[in-house]
Image (spheres, rainbow, N blue to C red):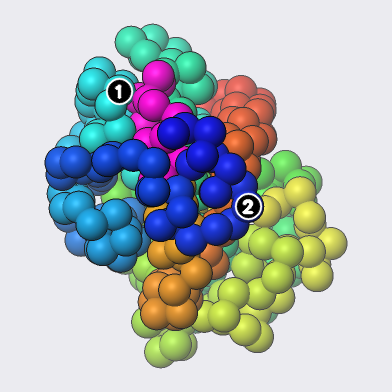
């Protein structure tokens, strides 16, 4: 059966071809979200699993297990029976937590296996409306000339915004003081109040402030502009290709999952991401869908792990 499913998925055939030889799934599937309900990861998970449930003809239950910088949700998945009925929506922490938490009781790279990528949203560099910086080169030049004057906020030590800003500092060759907050909301409040210089952040979190003119977007940290902010220059156009940074999502499961389960789930996910309604909704969230094989997602996570581990070690970042 597994060979038939693998062949069908590899050939890009419909899910029905991959399902033909097995009764999986024969009971509800649980997908763990290691964050609180209502956040970006939760929204994305519910969007894709709703369609996957229809394709798989089986209930998919989303379970929120937040805490410990997603380590609670990750460990819960690692310890689950590897039968294809417990998955995790993984995000950036899958690639960074091993470096941030050297004493973890599990190894994300060893104990979790890829099912498939969902998509990503590039981060954007924003400044207050009263900032004198009109472009990212303006900010970088000031930071080089005044190494003790710039500051930036993030949702906490080791967060995606923290790591992205450290990567930008290294690429741009400037300095800025990191101010960690207990979540993104208080950091945005201080940015709006002109108490910090800039932030690297998911545009969905600040799009209303950008549209109202309270914040100014200087750059999208990707090779291309985001559809949410089509007139904001990309990092590539600003000659900063080493500063690409995004929030991303994908499905993983405990190691030793059956090959037929992995490939059927991947087939359902890829068909979901080909649905125009799903693509449209993801675009409204500032995200780009990235369908691919389990191996594609695995290779992406490996590259992200190398990239962010280097940033964490170079900047001597410690988790909260």
Q: Which residue is mark 2?
A: 11
- Relative to 263, is 142 on the left or the right? right
**Eyeballing the image, is 264 above or below 278?**
above
Q: Is residue 72 left or right of residue 158?
A: left
Residue at image x 44%, y 87%? 211
| On-image quarter of the N terminus | top left
Q: Badge 1 is on which residue?
A: 82
Relative side of 239 to 102, left or right: right
Position in image of residue 284 (x %, y %): 42, 78
The x, y position of residue 175, in whole percent, is 67, 45
**Mark linked to residue 247:** none
Residue 119 coordinates in the image, percent (x, y): 50, 58
Total of numbered circles in the picture? 2
In the rendered image, residue 77 lying in the magenta stretch gets the answer: no
Q: Which residues are magenta?
A: 249-265
Residue 264 lies in magenta, yes or no?
yes
């Amino acid at each position: 059966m597994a060979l038939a499913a693998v062949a069908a998925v590899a050939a890009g055939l419909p899910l029905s071809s991959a399902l033909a030889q097995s009764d999986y799934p024969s009971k509800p599937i649980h997908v763990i979200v290691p964050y609180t309900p209502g956040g970006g990861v939760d929204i994305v998970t519910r969007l894709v699993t709703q369609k996957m449930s229809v394709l798989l003809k089986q209930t998919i239950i989303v379970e929120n297990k937040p805490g410990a910088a997603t380590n609670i949700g990750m460990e819960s998945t690692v310890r689950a029976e590897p039968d294809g009925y417990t998955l995790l929506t993984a995000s950036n922490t899958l690639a960074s937590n091993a470096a941030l938490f050297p004493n973890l009781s599990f190894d994300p790279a060893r104990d979790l296996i890829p099912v498939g990528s969902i998509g990503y949203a590039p981060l954007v560099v924003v400044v207050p409306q009263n900032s004198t910086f009109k472009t990212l080169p303006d900010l970088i030049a000031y930071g080089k000339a005044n190494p003790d004057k710039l500051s930036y906020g993030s949702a906490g030590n080791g967060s995606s915004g923290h790591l992205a800003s450290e990567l930008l500092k290294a690429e741009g060759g400037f300095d800025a003081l990191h101010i960690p907050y207990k979540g993104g909301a208080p950091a945005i409040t201080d940015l709006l109040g002109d108490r910090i210089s800039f932030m690297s952040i998911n545009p969905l979190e600040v799009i209303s402030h950008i549209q109202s003119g309270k914040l100014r977007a200087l750059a999208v940290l990707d090779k291309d502009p985001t559809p949410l902010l089509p007139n904001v220059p990309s990092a590539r156009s600003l000659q900063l290709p080493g500063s690409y940074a995004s929030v991303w999502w994908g499905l993983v499961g405990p190691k030793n999952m059956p090959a037929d389960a992995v490939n059927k789930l991947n087939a359902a996910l890829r068909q979901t991401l080909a649905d125009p309604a799903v693509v449209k909704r993801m675009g409204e969230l500032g995200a780009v869908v990235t369908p691919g094989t389990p191996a594609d997602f695995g290779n992406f996570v490996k590259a992200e792990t190398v990239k962010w581990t280097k940033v964490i070690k170079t900047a001597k970042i410690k988790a909260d």
